[in-house]
Image (spheres, rainbow, N blue to C red):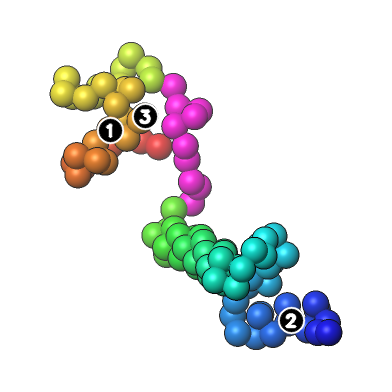
Amino acid sequence: MNNPQTIEATMRTLKLGGLAKECRSAQYYNPEQYMQELLDIEIKEHEANRMARVIKQAGFRVIKALDDFVWKPIIEIPATITCEQIENADFVPKKENLVLIGAS
């Protein structure tokens, strides 16, 4: 039987870091399902790494969420959109752009 540490080392050598971290979480029911689950794990890892890389390249100092944002009366937004629509990202499915300008 193969040593689990050797299998994880081989995965890392092949740059399959997602599998090396999460392979034990995959449930085995049949070969096709198991392989698909492993591939899905690796795809999620690749996507997370890609997003981290893109954010780093963009030079954002801090990722901010709207959770802590306070809509003050001095903040002006167009009459065509509400604060709730911005928070819910209602403009995304419509393929509309949203540009927010001001001091951070």
Screen quadrant of the C terminus: top left
Q: Which residue is mark 2?
A: 7
Screen quadrant of the N terminus: bottom right
Image quadrant assignment for residue 31: bottom right
Q: Secondary structure at mark 2?
A: helix
Compare residues 60 and 98 and report the one nearer the observer: 98
Compare residues 68 and 21 and report the one nearer the observer: 21
Dot 3 or dot 2, earlier in sequence? 2
- Residue 19 location in percent, x, y? 63, 70
Residue at figure coordinates x 68%, y 72% from the top left: 20
Q: Which residue is mark 3?
A: 87
Compare residues 98 and 9 and report the one nearer the observer: 9
Q: Secondary structure at mark 3?
A: helix
Gap between marks 1 and 3, in whole Å? Answer: 8 Å
| Type of amino acid at the residue the image marks with label 1 | Asp
| Type of amino acid at the residue the image marks with label 3 | Glu
Please determine whether, in this image, residue 98 is positioned above or below residue 75.
below
Residue at figure coordinates x 38%, y 20% from the top left: 71
Magenta-colored stretch includes residue 46: no
Locate residue 2 relative to residue 86 in the image: left or right.
right
Image marks 2 and 1: residues in contact by CB distance under 8 Å: no
First to last magenta residue range: 61-70
Q: Residue furthest left?
A: 80
